[in-house]
Image: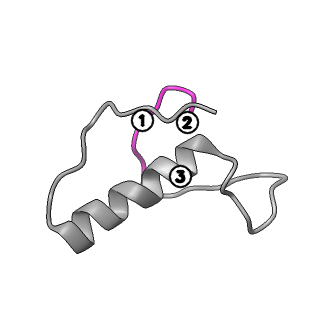
Amino acid sequence: MKANKDFDLMIYPNMGHVLDKNPYFVRQRWDYFVRHLLGMEPPKSYLITK
């Protein structure tokens, strides 16, 4: 996550079900919607900061 790399299995230790404060999770969720709802490829190196 710190390297902003993509991977399929996401395990977030010591975190509850609300992950909105994790920038990596937010980017992955946005990327999913861009791919599957817009039918476009999201920018590869886009980085969300706190």
Up/down of 40 relative to 1, above or below: below
> Which residue is painted at 56% across and 56% down in the image?
10
Element under label 1?
Answer: loop
Q: Which residue is mark 2?
A: 1
* Quadrant of the rendered image containing residue 16: bottom right
Q: Please tell me whether residue 2 belongs to the stretch shown in magenta.
A: yes
In front: mark 3 or mark 2? Answer: 3
Residue 34: image location, x then y, percent: 27, 61
C-alpha separation, residue under disc 3 versus residue under disc 2: 12 Å
Where residue 23 appears, as percent x and y from the top left, is 58, 42
For the point 25% across and 71% down, the residue is: 36
Question: What label sits on residue 37 in the rendered view?
Answer: none
Examine the rendered structure and indicate whether residue 4 appears above or below residue 36. above
Looking at the rendered structure, the secondary structure element under dot 3 is helix
Of badges 1 and 3, nearer the viewer stands 3
Q: Quadrant of the C terminus?
A: top right
The number of callouts visible is: 3
Q: Which color scheme did the rendering employ for the protein?
A: one colour
Q: Residues within 10 Å of mark 1 (few under 14, many from 20)?
A: few
Q: Is residue 34 magenta?
A: no
Q: Secondary structure at mark 2?
A: loop
Q: Magenta residues, as a range?
A: 1-8
Give the residue type at disc 1: Lys
Q: Are marks 1 and 2 in contact (CB under 8 Å)?
A: yes
Q: Are marks 3 and 2 in contact (CB under 8 Å)?
A: no
Residues packed near mark 3 inside 10 Å, few (<14), some (14 to 19) or many (20 plus): some
Extreme residue toward the top, this view: 3
In which quadrant is the N terminus drawn? top right
Q: Which residue is mark 3?
A: 26
The residue to which callout 1 is attached is 5
How far apart are labels 1 and 2 at the CA level?
A: 6 Å
